[in-house]
Image: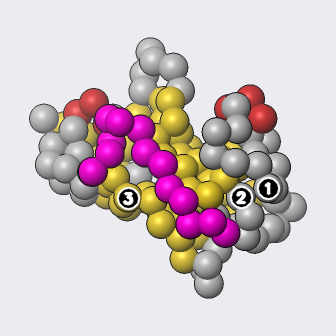
């Protein structure tokens, strides 16, 4: 069974840090576009960061560039999102997702077919 398990959310004060994890089961992160999305209350889902595994390329939304870092531990088959200098506007439910194997990070969101369950991040001012 192909699954993603997202975890690591929590409540922090502005300026704090959190690390989110996205663990895969039933498949290996060898040639995937592993994407972190977030959705804040009343807002549309937005892409936060993406890693093109196998190529080592990473991409970030402008709003998180320089504050968030996406990385992978191949031995654990887990992708991480290190979030530093958190701001209240980072408050959202964060999801990891992948499109079919071999697709790239600019794959349209509707083609992402495996989603984690979401982990909630709350940043207070």
Using residue 91 as the reference point, say whether residue 55 is left or right of it.
right
Q: Position of residue 12 (x, y in %)?
A: 23, 49
Q: Is residue 23 above or below residue 38?
A: below
Specify the segment rendered in magenta: 54-67
Q: Nearer the viewer, residue 119 or 84?
A: 84
Q: Position of residue 80 (x, y in %)?
A: 48, 63
Q: Which mark is residue 32?
A: 2
How far separated are the C-alphas under marks 1 and 3?
22 Å
How far separated are the C-alphas under marks 2 and 1?
6 Å
Secondary structure type for disc 3: strand
User: Which residue lies under the disc numbered 1?
Assistant: 102
Using residue 33 as the reference point, say whether residue 63 is left or right of it.
left
Q: Position of residue 13 (x, y in %)?
A: 16, 46
User: Which residue lies under the disc numbered 3?
Assistant: 69
Q: Is residue 98 above or below residue 90?
A: below
Q: Earlier in the sequence, mark 2 or mark 1?
A: 2
CB contact under 8 Å: marks 2 and 1: yes
Q: Does residue 118 appear anywhere in the picture?
A: no
User: Is 6 inside the magenta-drawn segment?
Assistant: no
Q: Which mark is residue 121?
A: none
Residue at position x 82%, y 49% in the image: 100
Residue at position x 76%, y 49% in the image: 103
Residue at position x 40%, y 52% in the image: 9
């Amino acid at each position: 069974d192909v699954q993603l398990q997202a975890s690591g959310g929590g409540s922090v004060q502005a300026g704090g840090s959190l690390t989110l994890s996205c663990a895969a089961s039933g498949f290996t992160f060898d040639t995937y576009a592993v994407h972190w999305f977030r959705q804040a209350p009343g807002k549309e889902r937005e892409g936060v960061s993406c890693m093109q595994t196998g190529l080592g390329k990473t991409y970030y939304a402008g709003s998180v560039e320089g504050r968030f870092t996406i990385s992978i531990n191949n031995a654990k088959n887990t992708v991480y999102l290190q979030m530093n200098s958190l701001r209240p506007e980072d408050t959202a439910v964060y999801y990891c997702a992948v499109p079919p194997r071999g697709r790239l990070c600019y794959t349209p969101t509707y083609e992402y077919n495996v989603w984690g369950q979401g982990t909630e991040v709350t940043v207070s001012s």
